[in-house]
């Protein structure tokens, strides 16, 4: 008959030895630390970032409408054909500039931090403000 071994109470407190199949040596499993400089483009946006981009997207849409109204009501007369062509190109660019700025910031800075992208959006909101629309309208 096989001799039964009495269970040792200290075996429950043992972490095992190197011959144990479940033993893992921590020295062979280094932990990789990600750099904080760049943003993972596959990571989802935070709620605050999505709200910020939505606010700027709506603001740029309003800017586009304001530039469209301003460009469609402003006429230049008494100029030659070359200058008239330049005026038409500039009208088109003034209308598409807010939407283009929004798209370029989202595309070009997609690997940057959210704060950097929102600061670029804020800079565009200041630079592309439709002053002619505000100055040529009477609101009272």
Image: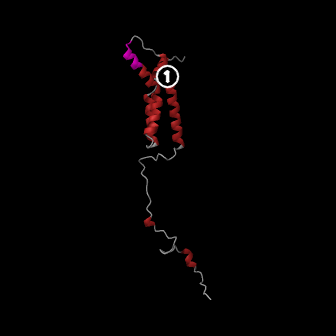
In this rendering, does residue 134 appear at all?
no
Which quadrant does the N terminus fall into? bottom right
**Residue drawn 42% across the image and 12% down it:** 77
Q: Residue furthest front?
A: 81
Q: Is residue 80 magenta?
A: yes
Q: Is residue 118 above or below residue 76?
A: below
Q: Secondary structure at mark 1?
A: helix
Residue 51 in picture, x, y percent from top left: 54, 38
Q: Is residue 101 above or below residue 21?
A: above
**Residue drawn 52% across the image and 34% down it:** 55
In this rendering, does residue 10 appear at all?
yes
**Residue drawn 37% across the image and 17% down it:** 82
Toward the viewer: 77 or 118?
77
Residue 53 in picture, x, y percent from top left: 51, 37
Magenta stretch bounds:
79-87
Toward the viewer: 121 or 25?
25
Q: Label 1: which residue?
A: 68
Magenta residues, dominant SS class = helix
Q: Residue furthest right?
A: 1
Q: Is residue 73 magenta?
A: no
Residue 6 is left or right of residue 29, and the answer is: right
Q: Is residue 123 above or below residue 19?
A: above
Number of labels in the image equals 1
Which quadrant does the C terminus fall into? top right
Residue 85 in picture, x, y percent from top left: 40, 18
Residue 83: quarter of image: top left
Residue 98 in picture, x, y percent from top left: 47, 29
**Residue drawn 52% across the image and 27% down it:** 62
Q: Residue furthest bottom?
A: 1
* Mark 1, other Cα within 10 Å: few <14 / some 14–19 / many ≥20: some
């Amino acid at each position: 008959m096989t001799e039964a071994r009495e269970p040792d109470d200290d075996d429950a407190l043992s972490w095992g030895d190197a011959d144990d199949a479940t033993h893992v040596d921590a020295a062979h499993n280094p932990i990789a630390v990600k750099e904080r400089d760049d943003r993972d483009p596959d990571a989802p946006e935070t709620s605050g970032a999505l709200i910020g981009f939505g606010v700027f997207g709506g603001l740029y849409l309003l800017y586009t409408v304001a530039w469209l109204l301003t460009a469609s009501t402003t006429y230049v007369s008494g100029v030659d054909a070359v200058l008239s062509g330049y005026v038409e190109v500039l009208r088109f660019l003034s209308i598409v500039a807010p939407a283009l700025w929004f798209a370029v910031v989202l595309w070009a800075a997609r690997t940057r931090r959210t704060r950097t992208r929102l600061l670029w959006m804020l800079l565009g909101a200041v630079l592309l403000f439709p002053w002619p629309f505000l100055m040529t309208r009477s609101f009272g």
